[in-house]
Amino acid sequence: MIYVTSDLHGYPLKKFQRLLEKAEFSQEDFLFVLGDVIDRGPEGAQLLRWMAEQPNVQLILGNHEAMLLSCEFLFEAVTEESLERLDTGKLELLSNWMANGAAPTLAGLRKLLKEEPEILEGILEYLHDAPLYDELVCGDQRYVLVHAGFENFRSDRPLEDYAPEELFWARPTPDTRYFEDAVTVFGHTPTGYFGSQYRRKAMKTDTWICIDAGAADGIRPTVLRLDDLAVF
């Protein structure tokens, strides 16, 4: 079975594991996480550590992971050279990340830096290796998995031609149409933004499914099973 979730935003790891148990997810199955694992909630670092250790879990990079990587200089050894490189541009990147809920994630990662630096190094490598999108066929249906949808979408535009920002920050509307021969699955936009009737749920159209139920606001995340489109 193939499962997809998105926008966990630091949701407690044990609660997320219980949700996966409810969805009957096992080591024989595969889970895609469509970005924004971290920030706002308390356990982003724990979630990343767990995911990086799972052979059957694949992260698709989100804008919050990209902000973390833009501030990777925070985890370097403090030397005269590193201090000289701490310019206004880097401080602006840090300010932007902090304004988007980085504090609990940063605290967790700095704890790892102090106590288990090799684990932190592995997490950063895991993020660097994470793709921006994935494609797969489940049953007879083709799926495109991406964090936020597509800005400047054209059905004839190759996926590799999209800049990361076009995949991180898209904000589709209910009448947005993507591929006619594939279902695009994404998060980033909490479904309640599409209307109060979609709050706490996945939202489906004939060309896309949004699965960000609003965990950034304390709502339980959504897990979608592609084999039968069951939502947990």
Image (spheres, rainbow, N blue to C red):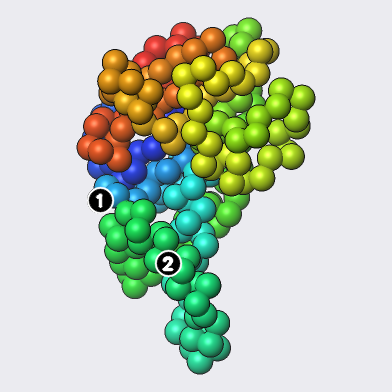
Which of the marked residues, 2 or 1, is nearer the chain's N terminus?
A: 1
Secondary structure, mark 2, is: helix
Q: What amino acid does circle 1 point to?
A: Pro
Does the rendering let one see residue 65?
Answer: yes
**Which numbered mark, 2 or 1, is in the foreground of this view?**
2
Q: Position of residue 105 (x, y in %)?
A: 33, 57
Q: What amino acid does circle 2 point to?
A: Leu
Crowd class of label 1 (few under 14; some 14 to 19; many from 20; radius 10 Å): many
Q: Are marks 2 and 1 in contact (CB under 8 Å)?
A: no
Secondary structure, mark 1, is: loop
Residue 167's disc number? none
Residue beneath the point at 65% across and 18% down: 179
Residue beneath the point at 53% across and 36% down: 170
Residue 42's disc number? 1
Q: Nearer the viewer, residue 213 or 109?
A: 213
Which image quadrant: the C terminus? top left
Q: Position of residue 2 (x, y in %)?
A: 50, 21
Q: Position of residue 183 (x, y in %)?
A: 58, 17
Seen in the picture, residue 49 relative to 138 is either above or below; the reply is below
Q: Nearer the viewer, residue 59 or 197?
A: 197
Residue beneath the point at 45% across and 14% down: 204
